Image (cartoon, rainbow, N blue to C red):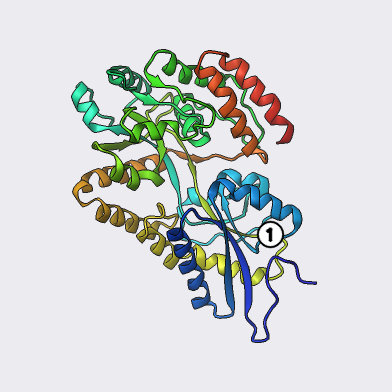
């Protein structure tokens, strides 16, 4: 009996495989359709049937489909969510040509569970106009946490904040990692939110708000608070991913600078994250699905996505195409784009994958709920992190 992970093989030997992917617009769906056509171009006996959902609903839908045995053969996966699907994806062979960090981020227990199409470090976005007006030196190589604190304080004036805070996992945890090396999970992927380095780092982070050097998110639903406040000109610095370089430079009404995260005790650090494509273990046509994933993550596909500005490619040979796209889109800000790409490369040099627990979605909801209590002074970092640890450890 055929599983619902693919359609029956046709008489002419052609197989149609379902491909699950997130998409937020018709433009994105058109890009994905183009990739599907690349698969059929290289393998005429394989067709991909695209199934999409908005990113915010994608992983809930994916969990439901796996539970019901209705998952697609080709499954798109984000590195931060990999832990929940480690037992459901087929191990793949890792080909050459990828940035090592992009492959590492999609591994669990040494197994390559998806092949990447992008790679993103977290960066410090800053308002160059505000820095110049305040007479504050812009971030450069060797810029430290102490420099960051002084700048945030000096730039908090006239109803504006020096820094826009966050409780989003990559945004917040990357800055904590750079501050003192604090990690939310152990090397064997067990939650350690209540470790002393995490308590110290969150106490420091919350202190930015208490000292009026940073704006505190208005509510636990404001996941993109810091970066939104930055683009709107209300916060002079924010942590954001490299995936927003193009849109931020284009949309901001001021000159945008981008630098690696400020260096703490062990230098500038960041978590890196990415996305890729895997094969469901329940797929009836694994050989064909693996061929499809090979094309979706191949040179031609990544060159195409880079040329569409979809993200910084995981394949090193195609990374220059992404910078070319950004420069063309921002021809009057080419120097800003080139400086941003230098920051991306520096960020990746200090980047490490963030491996997460199986219930990471639940952990991030706990972070939003309880870290806000720390930022507003309603709870101590120790109390809040202990609660996150206690509740989050139940389903890890």
Residue 311 placed where, x, y %? 41, 52
> Which residue: 28% across, 21% down?
155
Count how many numbered circles sit on residues in the image.
1
Which residue is most to the right? 1
Residue 283 placed where, x, y %? 70, 65
> Which residue: 76% across, 71% down?
2
Q: Which residue is mark 1?
A: 71
Residue 221 placed where, x, y %? 53, 32
Other residues around mark 1 within 10 Å, as few (<14) / some (14–19) / many (≥20) = many
Does 258 sit left or right of 266 as displayed?
left
Does 331 sit left or right of 396 as displayed?
left
Question: Which quarter shows the C terminus?
Answer: top right
**Is disc 1 placed on a helix, strand or loop?**
loop
Q: In which image quadrant can residue 304 be found?
A: bottom left
Q: In which image quadrant can residue 213 be found?
A: top left
Residue 129 placed where, x, y %? 21, 31
Which residue is most to the bottom? 12
Question: Which quarter shows the N terminus?
Answer: bottom right
């Amino acid at each position: 009996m055929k599983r619902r992970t693919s359609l029956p093989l046709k008489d002419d030997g052609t197989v149609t495989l379902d491909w699950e992917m997130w998409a937020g617009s018709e433009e994105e769906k058109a890009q994905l359709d183009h990739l599907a056509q690349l698969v059929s171009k290289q393998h005429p006996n394989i067709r991909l049937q695209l199934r999409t959902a908005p990113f915010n609903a994608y992983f809930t839908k994916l969990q439901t489909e796996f539970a019901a045995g209705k998952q697609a053969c080709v499954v798109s996966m984000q590195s931060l969510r990999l832990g929940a699907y480690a037992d459901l994806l087929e191990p793949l062979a890792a080909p050459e040509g990828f940035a090592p960090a992009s492959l590492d981020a999609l591994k669990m227990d040494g197994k390559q569970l998806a092949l990447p199409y992008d790679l993103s470090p977290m960066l410090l976005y800053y308002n160059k106009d505000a820095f110049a007006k305040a007479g504050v030196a812009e971030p450069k190589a060797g810029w430290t946490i102490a420099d960051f604190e002084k700048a945030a304080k000096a730039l908090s004036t006239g109803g504006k904040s020096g820094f826009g805070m966050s409780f989003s996992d990559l945004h917040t945890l990357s800055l904590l990692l750079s501050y003192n090396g604090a990690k939310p999970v152990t090397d064997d992927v067990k939650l350690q939110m209540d470790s002393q380095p995490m308590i110290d780092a969150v106490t420091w982070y919350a202190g930015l708000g208490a000292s009026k050097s940073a704006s505190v998110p208005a509510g636990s639903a404001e996941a993109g608070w810091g970066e939104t406040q930055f683009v709107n000109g209300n916060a002079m610095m924010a942590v954001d991913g490299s995936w927003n370089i193009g849109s931020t430079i284009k949309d901001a009404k001021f000159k945008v600078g981008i630098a690696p995260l400020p260096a703490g005790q062990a230098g500038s650090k960041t978590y890196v994250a990415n996305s890729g494509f895997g094969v469901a273990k329940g797929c009836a046509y694994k050989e064909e699905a693996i061929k499809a994933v090979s094309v979706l993550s191949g040179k031609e596909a990544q060159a195409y996505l880079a040329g569409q500005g979809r993200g910084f490619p995981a394949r090193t040979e195609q990374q220059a195409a992404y910078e070319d796209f950004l420069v063309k889109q921002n021809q009057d800000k080419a120097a800003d784009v080139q400086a941003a790409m230098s920051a991306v490369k520096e960020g990746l040099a200090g980047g490490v994958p963030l491996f997460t627990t199986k219930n990471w979605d639940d952990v991030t909801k706990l972070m939003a709920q309880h870290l806000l209590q720390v930022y507003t002074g309603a709870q101590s970092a120790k109390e809040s992190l202990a609660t996150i640890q206690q509740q989050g450890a139940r389903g890890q």
